[in-house]
Image (cartoon, rainbow, N blue to C red):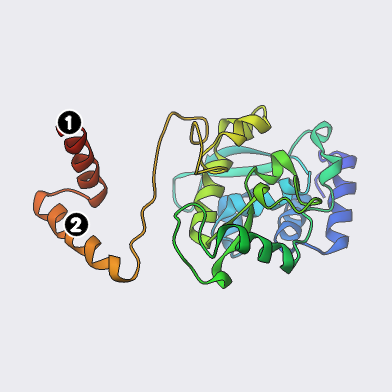
Amino acid sequence: MPPSIDERIIKIAQETIAAGKNKRAIAVLKALLDKGQITTDDLNDMGYNHPPRAVGDVRDLGIPVVTSSATSERTGRRMAVYTFGDPADIQDGRIGGRSALPKKFKNALLARYGSIDCITGAQLDERVLQIDHRIPYRIAGDHGLEGHEVESYMLLDASSQRAKSWSCEHCPNLLGNKKFDVCGTCFWAFPEDYKHIATEEIRRTDIVWQGEEVAEFDHLNEIAKAKGLSVSTLIKKLIAQSASDA
């Protein structure tokens, strides 16, 4: 074990490994304890094709991990290098990880929102929908869970969850001050009422065509192709034209 790792970090990491609750976090912790660092290449070799999420599991446990960068000998490109952070940043209230979410809680979310992805609005089979914290766990913990506050959670499919995870992991607020109120006005937390996306002045909407509506999309797509445009650009132009004609 590398001698530079603080004993407080070692103790919590070993306790987490012994608890055996999160296999992905345990794999990352074992590598960090063994080598003192772990890289994007290492995580890919371990079978994790989304390295930041694997490291995020460790951070969710309240164990600080910092990110630097280096050049991959394998690809010649920049890659992330993860090491344990300052033990003063250990979040004791998070040790042990996220609380298990009971099936009845998902049923409550389905009753509240319907069987939809809360980001795209797509109607989906409930089996592909996962419960997600509106405010990232690393900032809010299990806020609202004890009182079964469905408004503090949302349903997302795997694609939306990955997109939200990536954006949040690179957000200046999560990387910096971790202000709850900043997350509370973000698109990824409340797409129905937001002021920014990961602190940037951006507006977006997601439109899904399903069933008989697919024919409408195909028609739009043909028009867009004929004009050398994407569907989204065509829609923007049509809206702008409509607004100027009003």
- Which residue is painted at 65% across and 44% down in the image? 136
Q: Nearer the viewer, residue 147 or 156?
A: 147
- Of the numbered discs 2 and 1, the one sitting upstream in the chain is 2
Q: Which residue is mark 2?
A: 220
Q: Which residue is mark 1?
A: 244
Question: In the visual, does 205 lie left or right of 244?
Answer: right
Question: In the visual, does 229 lie left or right of 205?
Answer: left
- Which residue is painted at 70% across and 61% down in the image? 24
Circle 1 packing at 10 Å, graded few (<14), some (14-19), many (20+), is few
Q: Quadrant of residue 31?
A: bottom right
Q: What label sits on residue 80 in the rendered view?
A: none
Q: Nearer the viewer, residue 107 or 232?
A: 107
Where is residue 115 shown, x and y percent of the image?
A: 54, 65
Q: Is residue 178 visible?
A: no
Q: Which quarter of the rendering shows the C terminus?
A: top left
Identify residue type, mark 2: Leu
Identify residue type, mark 1: Ser
- Which residue is painted at 83% across and 35% down in the image? 87
- Which residue is painted at 67% across and 27% down in the image? 177
Where is residue 86 shown, x and y percent of the image?
A: 78, 33
